[in-house]
Image (cartoon, grey):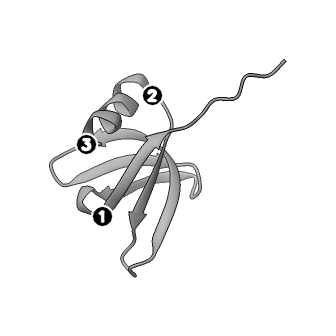
Amino acid sequence: MVGLLNKSLYEKEKIMIYYIDSDGKVSQRIIRVVGIDEEKVLAYCYYRKQVRSFKLENILSCGQIKRSVGA
């Protein structure tokens, strides 16, 4: 998981994360990582349209976004 977060940081790619928020609800977000430390990920959240902080321990999973190829 940390490898994909680092890839998003260095290659400026969007990824999708699932995480547990402070109320215990699972949420899905599309983000682009702008910074990582030992406890948090700083990322631009495309849902909230602003930079947000996500606790690493609350991120359940992350994955690449499939790119569609158009004609």
Label 2: how many Cα within 10 Å (few below 14, some 14–19, many 20+): few
The answer to whether marks 2 and 1 mark residues whose Cβ atoms lie closer than 8 Å is: no
Q: Secondary structure at mark 1?
A: helix
What is the number of callouts on the image? 3
Q: Image height check: is 32 above or below 52? A: above
Left or right: residue 47 versus residue 20 is: right
Amino acid beneath label 2: Lys
Q: Earlier in the sequence, mark 2 or mark 1?
A: 2
Q: Whole-Å distance between the Cαs marked 3 and 2?
A: 13 Å
Q: Position of residue 62 (x, y in %)?
A: 40, 47
Q: CA distance from mark 2 to mark 1?
A: 22 Å
Q: CA distance from mark 1 to mark 3?
A: 14 Å
Find residue 39 and name its label.
Answer: none
- Identify the residue under disc 2: 12
Residues 22 and 4: in front is 4
Check residue 58 in the rendering and tell me which mark sits there, or answer none.
1
Q: Which comes before the other along the chain, label 3 or label 2? A: 2
* Mark 1 or 3: the one toward you: 1
Q: Amino acid at mark 1?
A: Asn
Residue 36: mark: 3
Do labels 3 and 2 touch, CB within 8 Å? no
Residue at the image point whose x is 25% and y is 42% from the top = 36
**Image check: 35 left or right of 21?**
left
Q: Position of residue 12 (x, y in %)?
A: 45, 28
Identify the residue at image location x=40%, y=62%: 19
**What is the crowding at mark 3: few (fewer than 14 residues within 10 Å), some, or many (at least 20)?**
some
Relative to 1, is 61 above or below?
A: below
Provide the secondary structure element on which disc 3 rests: strand
Of the pair 58 and 10, the residue shown nearer to us? 58
